[in-house]
Image (cartoon, rainbow, N blue to C red):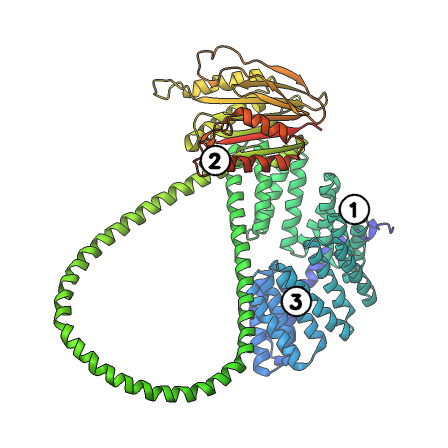
Amino acid sequence: MRIFKPHFFSLLLVFLPLLASSQQKKIDSLRHIYFSNAPDSTKLDALNALIWPLYSNSVPDSGIKYGHIAVRIGEKNKLLSKLTVTYRRLAICYTNITDFKQALFYHQKSLTLARQLDRTKDIGIALGNIGVVYQDLGDQTKALDYNLQCIRFLEKAGDTYSVSNNYYNIGLIYKDMGESGKALEAMRKCIHNARASGNNNALGVGYNGMGIIFKVKKEYDSAAWYYRKGILTNIEGGNLYNLSEAYVNYGSYFTELKQYDSAIVYLNKSLKIATDINLKGEAANALANLAFCSIKKGQYKTGISQALQSLRLLPEDLGNKAYCYEILMEAYGSTGDYENAMKATVIKYATEDSLRKMNVSKDLIKLNLQFEYDKKAAADSIRFHEQKKISEAKVDAATSRLRMEKTVRYALVIGLFILLVFSYFIFTRFRLIKKQNIIIDNQQKETQKQKALLEEKQKEIIDSINYANRIQRALLATDTLLKQNLGSYFIFFNPKAIVSGDFYWASKLSDGRFTFVTADCTGHGVPGAFMSLLNISFLNEAINERLLTDPGKILDLVRMRVIEALSEDGSMEGGKDGMDCNIVVYDFKTNTIEYAAAHNPVWICRGKEIIELKADKMPVGKHDKDSVPFSTHSFSLQKDDLVYTFTDGYADQFGGPKGKKFKYKQLYQLLTDNSTLSLVQQRELLYKTFSDWKGELEQIDDVCVVGIQIN
């Protein structure tokens, strides 16, 4: 393995500002040529150099502006060989702003012109670029087809450098298709051709690609070796753009291994290069990854600052925006800044909605392109038959016309007679119908107006509830938190009406143990959801602010806060709302649990037997026993025990052949009979059994069933 040369990289960092300055001087020089009295052919060369690579990555909008100027000059002077390049580079700028339709339009023009000129290399490059657009659109089949076509032409032209680049694209396509073996083979061909071309830039790209594939395969030693080779090769070749990307990839490798200090070192190197040569996309990417590492190290202030810098650099990139706001959501939540955490949550979900719409837009573009292709193919196949039919139709039309004219004459005579007979009748009926239509039209307009108003109000209500559902789900226990602290688990969560009175919530305790709460608040729908948010806030206060660790005392505090909050609600009951729940605290070091339960028991499935851990017969809320403290119990677990917690919604559901309740006895039998299945299969079975039992009947309550396996 080759060893890094720190002094070499240090010199490179010293010269980065000079290289950036040199690039700006080159841009100024090319612009000067365009504005000079140079021949149009020379101006077109200067414009082509401006479009790519100088503007395409950093300022694609400027690349498009100069690209259209170059097209006008090239087409006016019929500079066809140069125009092939112009079309190609303008298309690349459109690809970089995700205007895939325009990108394909200009790549096709470049391909058509290259074929007219019989330029083998340009044909190959155009085919490869079309493959890149389809790759960005997510159409892996077409992307692979165009890249393979491209390679045949480029190999014929002897362009090993471009062949190397296309094998890199093929490797990434196979990676996205889940074909890691084929992806590695393509990357090896990429490296082989890069060496044959003697181009260090292509070689560095190939090494980086091998690192990406090995990381996907989770063969981390091999991934690290190739990442380091790629970095060294890019340093030796002075390829700053690829070097910045290589450092980000190496940093993400350390991030995946949770070696955040090492990740930060390489991400900062990427950020330094990207900033010096104005690569906003790479800089934003590096900052977002740095923010993630800072948050994981508990450096929340630094992480927040880095995420906000990333957003300012690349506000239009929805993927980066969603990722940054997810980081901000966790950072603000961890520092107790719940207002900003909620704002970040709302923006994150709104951005993910926009991403989903963007993906739908991409699918529509693909469908439109496929439709146009199919339409052209169909037109070509039927054009010959249509010409034949036209000749035959002309003869038939002349004969038919003579027959038709004779028939029409007879029909006109008969029609005029009938018209005279019914004219008077129609006239009198018309006046009556006109009056009736005016009355009906007025009634319909009023009906439509009321219907539109009702639909608008209904939509506003549903939109508000859906938005509330997203906020409520953001406060539930996240998959990330559960995967970090539990082994295997499943959650079957099925609200009755979008938002739910049932909820599940989890948190680390101050003593290092992990607690999980399964709860059923009074009511369901919007009232139940308000109660769930209230109870979650009180649980958060008890555990994360007052640092309580005893389950019974946690429920005592929550009950007290619920009664205080609802005692002056103005009702005769004086705030008897609350919740039934159980709170289970896991100590995986000793394989024991402590629990407290209000009405809802805890079931432990051991083998084919369920052990029921009894609950206190009182709710978390106002009750005639609200002065009695909740009991805390402990229980020793064994390997492969299954801990089930649930609300009453599943057992109380009406259905089956006689429309009766499902009941706990059937739930007990269902869980014991299927306890040997995987937790994913158990969840699917619970869902199917519930759906089959309910049938066409209405769901009567929110449903929540949780299963946790002890490893």
Which badge, 1 or 3, comes first in the chain's sequence? 3
Nearer the viewer's eye, disc 1 or disc 2?
A: 2
Name the side, left or right, on which 118 lies relative to 574. right
Give yes or no for contact between labels 1 and 2 (Cβ–Cβ under 8 Å).
no
- Kindly report the distance in space between the C-alpha atoms of the residues bearing marks 1 and 2: 47 Å
Q: Which amino acid does label 1 sit on?
A: Glu
Image position of 306 with respect to 676: above or below: below
Q: Which amino acid does label 3 sit on?
A: Asn
Q: Which of 59 and 631 is in front in this view?
A: 631
Which badge, 1 or 2, comes first in the chain's sequence? 1
Badge 2 marks a residue whose secondary structure is: helix
Q: Which residue is drawn at 66% across and 79% down?
A: 115
Nearer the viewer's eye, disc 1 or disc 3?
A: 1
Q: Which amino acid does label 2 sit on?
A: Lys
Which badge, 3 or 2, comes first in the chain's sequence? 3
Give yes or no for contact between labels 1 and 3 (Cβ–Cβ under 8 Å).
no
Badge 1 marks a residue whose secondary structure is: loop
Nearer the viewer's eye, disc 3 or disc 2?
A: 2
Residue of label 1: 219
Residue of label 3: 129
Q: Nearer the viewer, residue 689 or 99?
A: 689
Q: Residues within 10 Å of mark 1 (few under 14, many from 20)?
A: few
Residue of label 2: 694
Name the side, left or right, on which 331 lies relative to 121. left
On the image, the x and y values in percent for residue 230 come to: 79, 54
Q: Which of 672 and 285 is in front in this view?
A: 672
Q: How crowded is mark 3: few (under 14 residues within 10 Å), some or many (20 or more)?
A: many
Badge 3 marks a residue whose secondary structure is: helix
- Kindly report the distance in space between the C-alpha atoms of the residues bearing marks 3 and 2: 54 Å
